[in-house]
Amino acid sequence: MTRPSVVGHGIIASHDAAHDIDTLQRYKVSHILNVAYGVTNLYPDLFVYKTLRILDLPDTDITSHLAECSSFIDEARKQEGVVLVHCNAGVSRSSSVVIGYHDAERGAFV
């Protein structure tokens, strides 16, 4: 399993990390933003989940999901939580969501 990347107020990872209870506990994850397609949420009684099934295709408009993702991350931050953002591989969709969130936070993304 690839080691999760800690970025700002959260963690970017693959679905492997989202399914590994030891990793989730080690990083003190409280909220999980699942932007993968076809990946189930294994621990609904232990974590707060938000699931958006976003396809990893060139014509997918990830920006149309950023407001909803940002609201979830903001709510977790208000609760002093740690958010794990994951897609299938932890490379494109999860990273795009986190970059979009940080750009919006700085006022760079509208």
Image: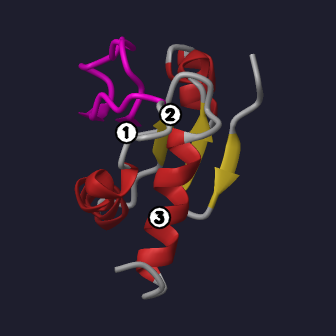
Q: Which residue type does callout 1 highlight?
A: Leu
Q: Is 94 rendered above or below residue 88?
A: below
Disc on res. 67: none
Residue at left 49%, top 40%?
A: 84
Query: Residue 102 at x, y = what percent?
Result: 51, 71
Disc on res. 100: 3
C-alpha span from label 3 to label 1: 14 Å
For marks 3 and 1 on the same chain, the one whose residue lies earlier in the sequence: 1
Disc on res. 86: 2
The residue that disc 1 covers is 33
Residue at left 31%, top 64%?
A: 74
Q: Is 14 rendered above or below residue 75?
A: above
For marks 2 and 3 on the same chain, the one whose residue lies earlier in the sequence: 2
Q: Say whether marks 3 and 1 touch (CB < 8 Å).
A: no
Q: Is 44 rendered above or below residue 79?
A: above
Q: Is 45 rendered above or below residue 104?
A: above
What is the residue that sits farthest to the right in this orientation? 2
